[in-house]
Image (spheres, rainbow, N blue to C red):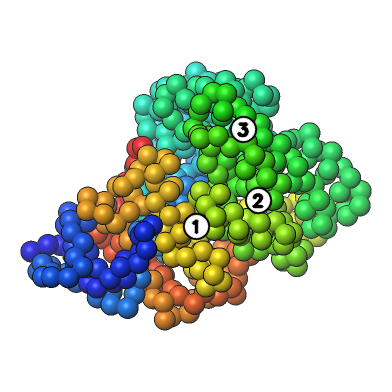
Amino acid sequence: MIDLLVRRGRVVTEAGVREQSLAIENGRVVALISDGEEPAARKVIDAAGKLVLPGLVDSHVHFREPGLTHKEDFQSGSLAAAAGGVTTVMVMPTDNPFTLTPEDFEAKIALARDRCHVDYALQAGLGPDRRHVRALADLGAISFELFLSDLPPALLTDSAAALVLGLEAVRDVGGIAGVTPGDDSLYRHAAEIARGEHGGAPQAFARARPPEAEALGVAQACIAASSTGARTHLRQISCAASLRVLQALRGTTVTAEVTPHNLTLDEADFLRLGVVAKVAPPLRPQSDVTALRAALAAGALDVVATDHAPHHPDEKAAGATDIWKAPGGFPGVQTFLPLMLRLVDEGIIEQAALVRTCCAHPARLFGLYPRKGALQVGSDADLVIVDPGRPFTIRNRDQLSKARNVPFDGLTASASPILACLRGTVIMRDGQPTAPPIGEFLRP
Ligand SMILES: [Zn+2]
């Protein structure tokens, strides 16, 4: 007698789709049964006619705790994840304080304990002070995050030398570096011109983030990755210029991320929606969206991750008439799977590519595969069931993030996530979280 049998679903893996039953015991997959006898189970979920995917692995979320919990916290952010069929999150270090030292890291583990509805790993920030890399790796940091722009000095990598030294430090502990590309000098220059031309209108912000600044950061990171041999993961590729640099310069140790929003919305949507759609990098012209979609389909972009970046609605509202007064970013973890299902609807990617880029590959890159991101014998029984016959509409009123508002309100997909399991426990039904916070801390 096993704990749980998920019967006769269309199980989606990187290799394709196959009708199978999943036998689950002690939170793990113990058998995949194509034909033949199924074991007796204490609980059965009938998945006939439904898609069964590994739970999504979101390798880029900001949950704002400690210090910024009016925007989000471990509880609200992870509830939104569970509601969306995301069963593993990797949490960025840009809170208050930043997660830079072993003390910061241990304090964050303690804050998250018993409050997360999905499994979680923590990312460490790496700025000019590189003394703590070994200790942070020993504590289980899932990645080390280097920011080439947009952050205060404690977390800024502001020279080529700092980038090379940072990558060497990460390489020496066998870790992976996340690099957010950009260039503050170009942003300042472009912002000055944009303010003069467009004042506080959304156009001003769109113009203030030239693609060249991102592409320059991509080039620096690729060259530094080649010279150091460090595993380097580029965050939030948003434009064709970056893709061209990546294609020319990426060596064997560079991988790249793209967000669902940069694959879905364009600059015209930002100009129409205004502050709710303000994000950095910004929503780009349609030609960039088309290039990103082609790169994802071709495997040139490895991972999709949301950059879930919630802000309190009042903070966003402050930019209603002056775009510069609102922070960039919006929630993404709950709308991740519906937006990816839209890309499947549109024929941009196949279901197997969704599993590769949103489950398997992020788990693999950050050292969690095949425990996470897969439905193999021995994998954690993290799964999401999708009803291909039930249309889904994204609604602001359904969002569980404290930020509430997303720029996707009203967008539809042909299929609905209807149930999610974390280690064999049902944590979501019909978009509603159903379980206490059983999420556990994950080490690479
Ligand atoms: Zn981010």
Residue identifier under label 3: 221
Amino acid bearing label 3:
Ala
Q: From this view, report whether residue 224 is shown above or below residue 210.
A: above
Label 2, label 3: how far apart the Cα atoms are: 16 Å
Residue identifier under label 1: 333
What residue is drawn where x is 22% and y is 72%? 7
Nearer to us: label 2 or label 1: 2
- Looking at the image, residue 199 sits to the left or right of residue 247; the answer is right
- Looking at the image, residue 431 sits to the left or right of residue 128; the answer is left
What residue is drawn where x is 30% and y is 68%? 18
What residue is drawn where x is 91% and y is 52%? 197
Label 2, label 1: how far apart the Cα atoms are: 18 Å
Q: Earlier in the sequence, mark 2 or mark 3?
A: 3
Label 3, label 1: how far apart the Cα atoms are: 27 Å
Residue 163 place in picture, x, y as percent: 61, 26
Amino acid bearing label 2:
Ser
| Residue 142 in view (yes/no) | yes
Identify the secondary structure beneath mark 2: loop
Residue 33 place in picture, x, y as percent: 19, 65
**Quadrant for the N terminus in the image:** bottom left
Residue identifier under label 2: 238
Amino acid bearing label 1:
Val
Identify the secondary structure beneath mark 1: loop
Residue 55 place in picture, x, y as percent: 37, 58
Q: From this view, report whether residue 300 is shown above or below residue 266.
A: above
Look at the numbered disc 2 and say if its residue's Cβ is closer than 8 Å to ligand 1.
no
How many neighbours does mark 2 have within 10 angstroms: few (below 14), some (14-19), or many (20 or more)?
many
Identify the secondary structure beneath mark 3: helix
How many neighbours does mark 3 have within 10 angstroms: few (below 14), some (14-19), or many (20 or more)?
many
Q: As rendered, which of 205 and 214 lies closer to the eye?
A: 214
